[in-house]
Amino acid sequence: MNKKWGMAIDLDKCTGCGACQVACMQENNMPIFKDDSDLPKRVTFLDLMKVTNDKDAKKKYGEVQVAFVPKMCQQCEGNNLGAHQPIPLETVKKRVLGGEKVFFPGITYDEQDNMLYKPEVVYTKDMVEDLEKKGVKSVYFDNSQPPCVSVCPVVATDVGDDGVVSQVWSRCIGCRYCQTACPYEARAFNWWNPRYEGDFKKSLNPDVSLSSRGAVVKCTFCSHIWKRERDKLLAKGEKDLNKVKYNPACVSACPTNAIIFGDLNDPESPVYAKKLNNDERAVRLVHSIDKADPKVREKWIAKKNYPNPKVYYLSSQKWLRDILVGFKNS
Amino acid sequence: MKRTLLFFFLPFIISTYLSYILFIKACDYAMNVQAEKPLPFNHKTHMTKYNISNCEFCHGYYENGRFKGIPTVAVCKQCHEGKTAAEKIFFKNYKDTDTPWTSFAQQPDLVYFSHIAVMKNKKTAQCASCHGNKGVSMTTAKIKGKMLMGQCMDCHDSLKISNKCMVCHD
Ligand code: SF4
Ligand code: SF4
């Protein structure tokens, strides 16, 4: 799938009402525990965090400002250099015939999104000719590497075809490596067995599985809603899954439309990545790499895999942006 | 000497065997292998005698793409008008509110299985790929065994469909 779901959150519009958090918990069958003010042990996908420019209580009267930041799993992508760019088969053929060792770091797909080869398969002349015979004109690959996926010993967490990082609670053994690896504390560990009081159990969402004690849970951009919308589209006879559109529960719940959701690859979507990257107001939670000088940025990226999240925060206030990108004197 | 060894390991063997049985039973229970269907039904007659060649005639989809599963008695009555004495007696005994009227092959909670995604997509399966050749069976009993993840993955692999966790799990 040549999709890359992403999100943009306009913090100027956010009033901190918390509807997104409530909607998220209800959609994903989060239990309510006795003491949910116990922050480290609270189980929630979406945290509404309050930030202020007055951390050391030195601001004068009238200068103090606060903002609310909804923070969920940022669906990190890793560097993923060169991904989702169509590579003409002729170029591949030329390189193969020239005696080069051609392989791609991720799973390769053809332009119809059919899976072709597994990662790091070296292309031979026969393979290219076979593809030519099938009428393949170009290929693309995807090589997302979020920090949390590679550490999981039991493959309970994985990157989907649309770049969304999945988590299968029932498969998780609770080692919590991923929680340590995640730079955004987006994962929560279930310390207790979920309890649903009274009639709560009847209102649970049948599309999302319940997580038991001892498993790590996280936001999956409501991928079950995508599946639901896909089924609706298939029932209408549409077979191109790239046409599926959906909104996660938090996006639908936001009364001020502060959260918008869409395809980062699509120039017509409201969250087109290239547009957001040039937006003065947009920042991502990436330790100032995004705002660094392009040359320095390239050097860093070549050396190290950085999380490269897919959630953008928009704000017109500089102090807030500085806090979000993690500049030192903020 | 050998006999003492046997006696020594006997409790271990018995407990392994018992836990094996327990595990199998638990799996069967979770996947609803012995689903009860109180209405006797002959697939073969319906297929051959009445010339219904499309499974969707009775096992169709709702408008939003959900699979209807086992048809209701009301669906049967669309063809069986319930006028003859035999039919009257027959349908008097079966109501849609009867319990247990359970689903045929239940997948565990963590699976988001969608029939329409498998049957109406670009690459499709046949009903028989998972359910066996149900059309010629004379009962409602299950032909093929449990549907395990390996079977899904084999098919996905050979058809070059993505095998990412997200495709089926939630
Ligand atoms: S806690 Fe679960 S999901 Fe995380 S690394 Fe361990 S097994 Fe994998
Ligand atoms: S590292 Fe954290 S924020 Fe990034 S995809 Fe994994 S859980 Fe989400």
Image (spheres, coloured by chain):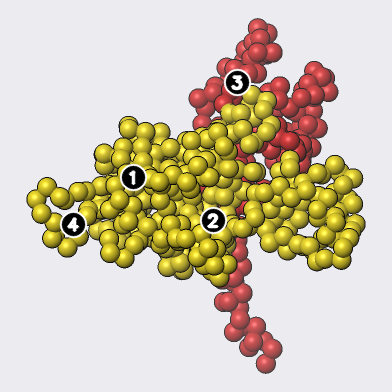
Chain colours: A yellow, B red
Query: Mark 4 or mark 3, which is nearer to you?
Result: 4
- From the viewer's perspective, is the residue at label 2 or at label 1 nearer? 1
Q: Which mark is in front, 2 or 3?
A: 2
Label pair 1/4, CB-CB below 8 angstroms: no
User: What x and y, as percent, mark residue A214?
Assistant: 41, 62
Subunit of mark 4?
A
Decide: marks 4, 2 in contact (CB < 8 A)?
no
Residue at (40% x, 62% y) in the render: A287
Q: Secondary structure under badge 3?
A: helix
Are callouts 2 and 3 both on one chain? no
Q: Chain of mark 1?
A: A
Residue A77 marker: 2
Query: Quadrant location of the C terminus of chain A?
Result: bottom left
Q: Is residue B36 left or right of residue A62?
A: right
Residue under pointer 4: A54
Crowding around mark 3 (Cα neighbors within 10 Å: few <14, some 14 to 19, many 20+) is: some
Going 71% across and 25% down the picture, which residue do you hit?
Answer: B56
What label does residue A73 carry, if any? none
Q: Which residue is mark 1?
A: A315
Vertical placement of A215 versus A234: above or below? below
Q: Is residue A199 visible?
A: no
Spatial CA span between label 4 and label 2: 33 Å
**Label of residue B73 in the image:** 3
Q: Is residue A296 visible?
A: yes
